[in-house]
Image (tube, rainbow, N blue to C red):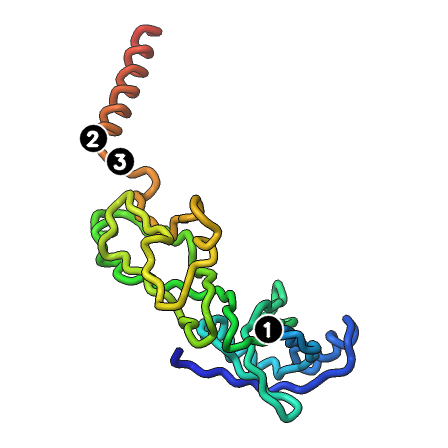
Amino acid sequence: MSATFTLAAELRTDTGKGASRRLRYANRVPAIIYGLDKEPAMLTFRHDDILHACEDEAFFSHILNIEYDGQSEQVIIKDMQRHPAKIQIMHADFQRIDAAHALHVNVPLHFLNEESCVGVKGGGLVSHLMTELEVSCLPADLPEFIEIDMGGLDIGDSIHLTDITLPEGVSSVILMQGEGHDQAVASIHMPRGEKIDEADEEAVEGAEGAESAEGAEEE
């Protein structure tokens, strides 16, 4: 994990919708830190600080340092509410972490060699069925992202969860649920309307010929 994120916060005492509206009007983001059997901490952040941090996808899969009231806590972001129409963060939830306990985090998927893979060179299109993967690991093993090599895929091929090589100490939460959960992550398919093989082409031509014969009989 190459990036480091440290955010400064302030404790807040006012709660409720009215207090949150006033904070947002003052360009602040209401937030909460919870977990590890400690009392939740009600905080506020400068809106621009969080907005700038969100520009880096690593922010959502990293251990974050939150400094407030003379102390520092390590957390992961668990939820973030955004305004549906404005570029505005409405609220953020952070969960405390413990180095000795596994955590569940959604990690971005990075797809490699898409443009050079056999299927795309043959006219196929790539479908990303997942863009992130929920993993379970200790905080020290948390990856910034997971790479998936698409180089060997042809048209009609798919990559499934069991095809992904995860870093040591990292497990897929979905696969931990047992057999039958090996979902497809990405696939290569032909564009709509394209003919895949000669058999399909002959079938279309045969149907068109039958329609022509029927029209001649009616005349």
> Residue 189, relative to residue 56: is it above or below?
above
Are discs 2 and 1 less than 8 Å apart at CB?
A: no
Q: Which mark is residue 95?
A: 1
**As rendered, which of 33 and 86 lies closer to the eye?**
33
Task: State the separation of the CA atoms marked 2 and 1.
Answer: 57 Å
Quarter-wise, where is residue 113 in the image? bottom left
Residue type, mark 1 in image: Gln
Percent x, y for residue 5?
Answer: 49, 82
Closer to the chain start, of discs 2 and 1, is: 1
Percent x, y for residue 130?
Answer: 42, 55
Percent x, y for residue 146?
Answer: 37, 65
For image coordinates 22% across by 34% down, the residue present is 197
Under tag 1, what secondary structure? strand
Task: State the separation of the CA atoms marked 2 and 3.
Answer: 8 Å
Q: Which mark is residue 141?
A: none
Quarter-wise, where is residue 1 in the image? bottom left
Task: State the separation of the CA atoms marked 3 and 1.
Answer: 51 Å
Q: As drawn, is 120 to the left or to the right of 24?
A: left
For image coordinates 51% across by 65% down, the residue present is 104
Residue type, mark 2 in image: Glu
> Residue 129, relative to residue 59: is it above or below?
above
Percent x, y for residue 94?
Answer: 60, 74
**Of the two numbered discs 2 and 1 in the rendering, the one whose residue sits closer to the viewer:** 1
**As rendered, which of 22 and 147 lies closer to the eye?**
147
